[in-house]
Amino acid sequence: MKALVFLATGFEELEAIGTIDILRRGEIETVTVSVTGHKTVTGVHGIPVIADELFENIDCTRFDALVLPGGGPGSENLNKHEGLRKALVDAYENNRLLAAICASPRVFGSLGLLKGKKATCYPGIEPELTGATLV
């Protein structure tokens, strides 16, 4: 299994680093990807993190899982990245694993990927989970 974890300005540091740590401890090849055009991405609490790769250098189709950490500003910035949005739709259509934490399920909701699915999110984001059964 190979996973991508996407980082945008304003990501929630704990959700990103904790997820990356658990995936790597589980021996899942995990690559962090910046969608900012720069390898250094600053989280919502001002902590800079150096991503492994830039989005434009990654072939998302070669990975089994695409993961979106949360953070209000980070999730909004992920949702604005057209290349990532296209990669998520392609992954969904090809039955690859998609995961989103905290506020980031809003990205899936905006793409219509939650129709008929169970989903949870950060309080207040629920209206953006279009088509989901909220749990």
Image: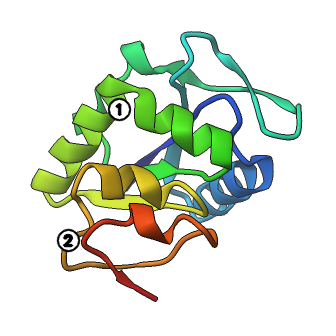
How many tags in the picture?
2
Residue 19, percent across and down? 64, 58
Q: Is residue 26 left or right of residue 127?
A: right
Where disc 1 sits, the SS reads: helix
Write the residue at 39% across / 14% down.
Answer: 57
- Tell me the quarter of the image containing the N terminus: bottom left
Write the residue at 30% across / 36% down.
Answer: 85
Color encoding of the figure: rainbow
Say which amino acid is labelled 2.
Answer: Lys
Q: Is residue 119 left or right of residue 43?
A: left
- Looking at the image, can residue 125 be seen? yes
Residue indicated by mark 2: 115
Write the residue at 59% across / 51% down.
Answer: 69
Write the residue at 31% across / 61% down.
Answer: 97
Residue 123, percent across and down? 63, 72
- Looking at the image, can residue 31 be seen? no
Say which amino acid is labelled 1.
Answer: Leu
Residue 99, percent across and down? 43, 61
- At label 2, counting other C-alpha atoms closer than 10 Å, the crowd grade (few under 14, some 14-19, many 20 or more) is some
Q: Of the residues under marks 1 and 2, which one precedes in the sequence?
A: 1
Residue 76, percent across and down? 54, 39
Q: Mark 1 and mark 2: span between their CA atoms?
A: 19 Å
Q: Which mark is residue 129?
A: none
Where disc 2 sits, the SS reads: loop
Q: Quadrant of residue 112?
A: bottom left
Q: Residue furthest right?
A: 46
Q: Is residue 11 left or right of residue 84?
A: right
* Placement of 110 over or under 134, stated as above or below: above
Residue indicated by mark 1: 84
Q: Quadrant of residue 8?
A: top right
